Image (cartoon, rainbow, N blue to C red):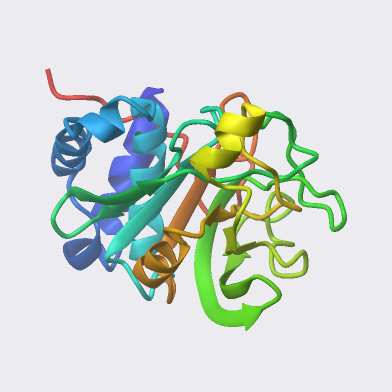
Amino acid sequence: MAIRLICLVMFFVFSPLNAHCVPSQKELSSTIQTLYRIPELRNNIDYNVLKKAMVGYYTLKSKGQLKNDKVLTIIDYNQPSVKKRLFVIDMDRNRLLTSSLVAHGKNSGQNLAVKFSNVPGSFKSSLGFFVTDRTYRGKHGYSLRLRGLQQGINDNALVRNIVIHGADYVSTDFIRQHGRLGRSLGCPALPFSQYRQVIDLIKGGSCLFIYKGNQNHVGRSDLLNPDIALHDPA
């Protein structure tokens, strides 16, 4: 653990973009704690998920891979589909912009997502870090392409047409009738009442982190290793 922490600090110190992109360890911990005081985040997302997402966000930002670094989006598939599990965070003001229900792939599970894949035709959700790509109008209307950043984990997202779009099976009415959300072919589908707002907030190269505990999709990444524990200040 100590070695991992030293590696993280050394990266922050010696990164050429450090002065502009990466906060100190103390500042990062303070930011995470500030966000976690927001009731909707604290009640719906695990602290460690937020921590991993934040470290990954700043790593990608320091590498110049985020054209839109104003927001960070987290999907926490630890939560059941009947709960809000997508969160868009304003990284400039350390506040929650919006939260939403979000579907998972039909072969990932029923109310809980338990199986994940990077394979075309699997109809399962993918995990890990993504960058939002271009918007377009397709069979689901206004949609947002996602580019997976982790080889073997989610890098087939564009080939698989994994996109954010609206769907009528993502709604409280559907939950009342079926006890869960409907499921997609692998896309993180959103309610029709919110999908445009979310797409417009996060389009154009922002960071999206999709997480599920006990899945080895983070440590295997050649791009970054957000599975580094930060010491919280005493």
**Location of the N terminus (image quadrant):** top left
Nearer-the-camera pick, 200 or 47: 200
Tell me: 193 left or right of 182.
left
Nearer-the-camera pick, 53 or 185: 185
Q: Residue at x 28, y 57 (%)?
A: 14
Eyeballing the image, is 24 above or below 134?
A: above
Residue 195 visible to an observer of this rendering: yes
Pick out the residue farthest to the top: 234
Eyeballing the image, is 226 above or below 81?
A: below
Task: Indicate the quadrant where residue 55 lies.
Answer: top left
Q: Residue at x 60, y 75 (%)?
A: 141
Tell me: 53 left or right of 69.
right
Tell me: 119 left or right of 13.
right
Residue 218 visible to an observer of this rendering: no
Eyeballing the image, is 149 above or below 1?
A: below
Q: Residue at x 51, y 28 (%)?
A: 79
**Location of the C terminus (image quadrant):** top left
Tell me: 148 left or right of 69.
right
Nearer-the-camera pick, 150 or 209: 209
Q: Residue at x 41, y 33 (%)?
A: 49
